[in-house]
């Protein structure tokens, strides 16, 4: 008896056990040849990597083989579905479209492109748009991967069927939910920056940005910049957290400033051991400038003030206490 292909199992699972009754997305039905090509390459590349994952990592929990696929839905979300037969990672087309629009806005933002320190031609903007979307999607997949291999599903108990990444927060959450999200952010950030700068992926990225003839140090800086903007674009896909209107400890996700800061800590940890010059280049002021420009490009006219309000909270006594407890929770979670 022939085994049922994972994509067929995924489609049946979506239709029968989730709200996604239209099942998986058939990429051949997409109108955009560019998007069809990008999503096909990402799916093939990451499914191969997931198939060949290192099973000898002590911190990883036992899990079924992975399969990444796309969900035919306009809802903006990403999911990790741990099951007995497959560990599914599903990205909705709504989320992909939302991130694609954000990446267009970012590539057209002069405040963003100013960080490239070169002549910004239409081709450079197009290349930047492609690199940002590619890395944002890589980060999302790595984030969902971590939810499964770090045992977050087991900790969540009855809620473990799915992790909602962008959908409405109205149901609320717990502080442990926030800790697991930061754990997934940090692990994903380390994996993505390592692959972007430290593997053959850099060759295509540098070429796409028309920087192949530049010195290696400049290439590294540009790639770290793109990583930072791409990860921020995913975090800013959620509406800004209005700190003060809700108990911050009952939100399902930390505010964007906390998530981005924690992800960058892990990324800079990789840089410290592999590209130490980048730890000097990515100063606090440069990081804040990049983050604010990203917020303004995605959130609109009020993006800068929304970002500044989160910074102000983190600098307050209540904010510093929250960050301290979040850090302690993450370290405690990692120890278990």
Image: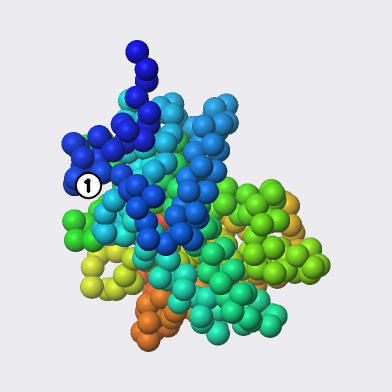
Image height of 258 relative to 16, above or below: below
User: x and y percent of residue 302 in the render?
Assistant: 36, 84
> What residue is drawn where x is 42% and y is 36%?
67
User: x and y percent of residue 279 in the render?
Assistant: 69, 64
| Quadrant of res 11 | top left
Mark 1 Cα within 10 Å, few/some/many (few <14, many 20+)? some
SS category of the residue bearing label 1: loop
> What residue is drawn where x is 31% and y is 60%?
94
| Quadrant of res 237 | bottom left
Please state which of residues 91 and 287 is positioned toward the viewer in this rendering.
91
Please state which of residues 88 and 308 is positioned toward the viewer in this rendering.
88
Image height of 5 relative to 311, above or below: above
Tell whether 226 sits left or right of 75: right
Quarter of the figure that contains the C terminus: top left
Q: How is the image coloured?
A: rainbow
Tell whether 30 sits left or right of 216: left
Please state which of residues 329 and 67 is positioned toward the viewer in this rendering.
67
> What residue is drawn where x is 55% and y is 38%?
49
Is any part of residue 62 visible from this angle? yes
> What residue is drawn where x is 42% and y is 41%?
68
Image height of 189 relative to 278, above or below: above
User: x and y percent of residue 192 in the render?
Assistant: 57, 52
Tell whether 332 sits left or right of 78: right
Q: Across the whole image, how many numbered discs are drawn on residues?
A: 1
User: x and y percent of residue 251 in the render?
Assistant: 28, 59
Is any part of residue 183 visible from this angle? no
Quarter of the figure that contains the N terminus: top left
Dot 1 corresponds to which residue?
22
Please state which of residues 10 and 56 is positioned toward the viewer in this rendering.
10
Name the outermost residue toward the top: 1
């Amino acid at each position: 008896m022939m085994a049922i292909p994972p994509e067929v199992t995924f489609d049946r699972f979506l239709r029968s056990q989730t709200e996604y009754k239209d099942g998986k997305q058939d990429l051949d039905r997409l109108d955009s040849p560019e998007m069809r090509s990008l999503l096909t390459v990402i799916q093939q590349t990451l499914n191969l990597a997931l198939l060949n994952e290192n099973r000898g990592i002590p911190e990883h929990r036992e899990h079924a083989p992975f399969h990444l696929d796309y969900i035919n839905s306009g809802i903006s979300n990403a999911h990790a579905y741990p099951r007995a037969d497959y560990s599914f990672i599903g990205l909705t087309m709504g989320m992909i479209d939302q991130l694609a629009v954000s990446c267009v806005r970012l590539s057209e933002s002069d405040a963003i492109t100013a960080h490239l320190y070169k002549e910004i031609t239409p081709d450079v903007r197009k290349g930047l748009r492609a690199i940002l979307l590619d890395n944002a999607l890589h980060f999302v997949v790595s984030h969902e991967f971590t939810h499964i291999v770090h045992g977050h599903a087991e900790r969540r108990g009855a809620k473990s069927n799915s992790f909602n990444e962008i959908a409405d927060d109205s149901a609320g959450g717990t502080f442990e939910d926030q800790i697991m999200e930061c754990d997934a952010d940090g692990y994903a950030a380390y994996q993505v920056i390592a692959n972007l700068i430290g593997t053959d992926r850099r060759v295509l990225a540098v070429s796409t940005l028309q920087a192949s003839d530049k010195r290696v140090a400049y290439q590294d800086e540009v790639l770290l910049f793109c990583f930072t903007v791409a990860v921020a674009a995913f975090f800013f896909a959620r509406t800004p957290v209005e700190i003060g209107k809700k108990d911050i400890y009952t939100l399902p996700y930390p505010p964007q400033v906390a998530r981005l800061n924690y992800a960058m800590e892990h990324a800079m940890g990789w840089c410290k051991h592999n590209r130490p010059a980048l730890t000097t280049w990515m100063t606090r002021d440069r990081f804040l400038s990049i983050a604010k420009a990203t917020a303004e490009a995605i959130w609109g006219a009020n993006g800068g003030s929304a970002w500044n309000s989160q910074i102000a909270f983190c600098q307050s006594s209540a904010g510093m206490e929250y960050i301290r407890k979040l850090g302690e929770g993450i370290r405690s979670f990692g120890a278990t």
